[in-house]
Amino acid sequence: METYISKNEQDTINFARNFAKNLNTGDVIVLSGELGSGKTKFVQGILEHFNLANEISSPTFTIVNEYIADKMNIYHFDVYRLEDSDEFFAIGGEEYFSKGICLIEWGELIENILPRPYTKIIFKKSDDNVDYRELCIEKIET
C-alpha cells in the first residue's frame, strides 16, 4: 500500500492529474472516505489530465456522469444511494467497466462485484488540520 499526503485541495488535484497518466480503458478506481474528504477533487484532477476540467459535476443524484475524452471515456459513479450490488446491476453499471475508466465514489459498497484487479484509494481527513488528507492507495488483486 502506498500513501500520499495532501496538504490542500490543489495537492489532491495535482496528485490525481499525475495518477491519471497511467490509466487505461478498463481501469476501475474505488474512492472511499467520508463526506468532504477529497474524492470529488481527485476526480477533478483526473478530468483535468484529460482536458475535461470544465465538465465536472457531482453524480450524486444521477449515479453516473459520462465524460468523453479524446483518448478514452471516463465514468464517474457515486453509488452512495444504492442499496446493494443488485441495484448497480439493475442500472447496467457493470457494462461500463470495459468501456473506459471507472471512478467510483463510495465503491466499497459494491466491491464484491468489481472486476479484479482494481485500485482502491482511501481518503482520510485529519483532526488537527482541516486541509490535510492522507490518501492510501492499494491494488486489489483478488
Image: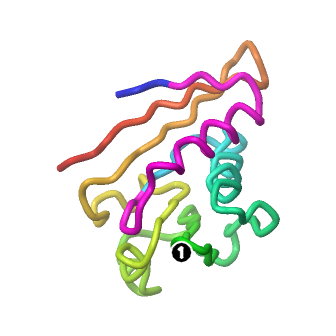
Residue 101 lies left or right of residue 14; in this view the side is left
Residue 32 lies left or right of residue 95; in this view the side is right
Residue drawn at x 24%, y 58% as measured from the top left: 116
Residue 127 lies left or right of residue 23; in this view the side is right
Residue 67 percent location from the top left of the image: 63, 75
- The answer to whether residue 96 is magenta is no
* Residue farthest along the left direction in this orientation: 142
Label 1 crowd bin: few (<14), some (14–19), many (20+), radius 10 Å: some
- The magenta segment: 4-28
Rendered position, 107 above or below 42: below
Residue 92 percent location from the top left of the image: 42, 86
* Residue farthest along the top direction in this orientation: 128
Residue 86 percent location from the top left of the image: 36, 77
Rendered position, 92 above or below 71: below
120 and 89: which is toward the camera: 120
Residue drawn at x 47%, y 24% as measured from the top left: 3
Residue drawn at x 61%, y 36% as measured from the top left: 15
Describe the element under mark 1 as helix, strand or loop.
strand
35 and 135: which is toward the camera: 135
Residue highlighted by disc 1: 73
* Residue farthest along the front direction in this orientation: 70
Rendered image coloring scheme: rainbow
82 and 25: which is toward the camera: 25
Amino acid on which the number 1 mark rests in the picture: Asn
Quadrant where the N terminus is found in the figure: top left
Rendered position, 103 above or below 35: below
- The answer to whether residue 8 is magenta is yes
Rendered position, 57 above or below 95: above
Residue 38 lies left or right of residue 139; in this view the side is right
Residue drawn at x 59%, y 22% as measured from the top left: 5
